[in-house]
Image (cartoon, grey):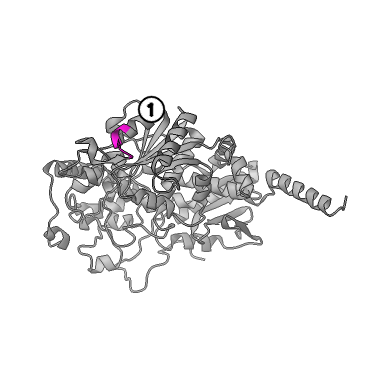
Amino acid sequence: MKKDQTLGETLRRQGVSRRSFLKFCATTASLMALPPSMIPVIAATLEKARRPSVIWLSFQECTGCTESITRSSSASIEDLIFNAISLDYHHTLQAASGSAAEQARETAMQENHGKYILVVDGSIPAANNGYSTIAGISNFDMLKEAAEGAAAIVAVGSCSSFGGIPHANPNPTGAVSVSDLIKDKPIVNVPGCPPIPAVITGVLVQFLTFGLPDLDHLGRPKAFYGQSIHDRCYRRPFYDKGLFADTFDDEGARKGWCLYKLGCKGPTTYNACATEKWNDGTSFPIQSGHPCLGCSEPDFWDAGSFYRSLSTPTENIGKAAVYGIGAGLLAGAVVGSVQRARKQSAVKAHQRVTIDDLDKES
Amino acid sequence: MTVHGTPGASPGCGSDTPCNIPTGNVVPLLHEILHALERWLDDGEEHAIDLRGIPMAPGEEDHLIETLGEGEIRADLSLTGRSVVLETRFPAVWLVTHYNTDDTIIGRFIEVCEMPAILKSQAEDARAGLEYLESLLSENNLQ
């Protein structure tokens, strides 16, 4: 594949029809929460886009983010875009190893200086550079070197976005996020443990079509992280009616009522799980009967027990529902605000998860 | 055909213990389609609705699709994963459903227009087809 080919040329050479391309653009517009009227704009822009060089660095991570993107589905429509970028370096996926692999990274950085996209998963140990190295190069040094010539950095996963699980109390490696270390490059955070594969692809498409996306206060693209799980949850009407599961095996749980009292972090968690879902759109945690853990939020691991509700919904929520969806949304926003404050205090207190929490005896 | 009510309520759920509470989005969507159809007839303005972006309780989307019904045209497209384009029983109101290669729905749109763009022949594909036909005739000395 030639690097100077446009995306449209590349796809045509691979036998992808224009109709398939339009289908890809339609589903991508939907993914990015763009109105369908934007589909022709996406198609026209993407068609002319050049295949970008992508360098993917993995630091203190579990490879879950790579698993997520590669196991989206075989020969999926997301694969189209991944076949159409030039993935020049990725520890896990590349065939080359040892010095040949590092040579590939250095060559890609030189040939595409100032133009390549740097994708990072995993946190960086700041306590001691020796905690994590690749080919004898510390994570921090490799990040600095690769970031210098990058057009933009995409921090994939909660570890590279916010420090993630390595950053959890007591954080033995002094794990930090990409944005803690790199201050002079645009950084797009795509948190999640792991992030939804279609969201990773969507961010790359958004970068190719419209440049850097609009970001929220945590550096996340608003198109995918603009709404809370709670606001998009199909169980939301139960919350508005005051119908909750109190344990994992009571009548409410069996009937699919709201999981708020079982510790659901949906009201304070911003992600696309409720609409995009997992396993090729099959389900997401709440649909499977488990509360949202809030994995796309900073310090989710230290924010108290997964199974303790951050605040108890007031009895008035059921009554407020009679005022309609608008009132429900307002109630959600207010409770969400209260929960955020509670969560922050939990982080400060470093509450530990106990067996009692797991048994949910409270 | 009932439009109101609680669609798709699960068996065993009574009025005291609901299993399924509608979001109430079906009727507003039908009104949106109504107004879009009026605008298309008056001004030719096309309109599309992305169903994936609208919260629906279990059964509500099925209820909406059942209400729209199926009209005279149904097209099965073999793309990267199949797509199904059907005209509903309301002419010029189309339901476009995209599947991935595992046959999972990855997008569903309602389009109000003469014909969804994805059904039309595409110039880029036609150009490739033209080259292929020319080479076929050339290879077989049929010029």
User: As rendered, which of B136 and A246 lies closer to the eye?
Assistant: B136
Coordinates of residue A203 in the picture (x, y in percent): 43, 41
Check the image and name the residue furthest to the bottom. Answer: B12
Check the image and name the residue furthest to the top. Answer: A184
Check the image and name the residue furthest to the front. Answer: A99
User: As rendered, which of B50 and B119 lies closer to the eye?
Assistant: B119
Q: Residue at x 25, y 45 (%)?
A: A336
Coordinates of residue B59 in the picture (x, y in percent): 43, 63
Coordinates of residue A325 in the picture (x, y in percent): 34, 50
Q: Which residues are magenta?
A: A135-141
User: As rendered, which of A176 and B103 lies closer to the eye?
Assistant: A176
Location of residue B7 (image quadrant): bottom left
Crowd band around label 1 with a 10 angstrom C-alpha radius: few (<14), some (14–19), many (20+): some
Q: Residue at x 57, y 45 (%)?
A: B47
Q: Which residue is mark 1?
A: A148
The quadrant of the picture occupied by the C terminus of chain A is bottom left
Asked which secondary structure carries label 1, the reply is helix
Q: Residue at x 87, y 52 (%)?
A: B141
Q: Is residue A119 left or right of residue A258?
A: right
User: As rendered, which of A88 and A322 lies closer to the eye?
Assistant: A88
Does residue A256 show up magenta in the picture? Answer: no
The quadrant of the picture occupied by the N terminus of chain A is top right
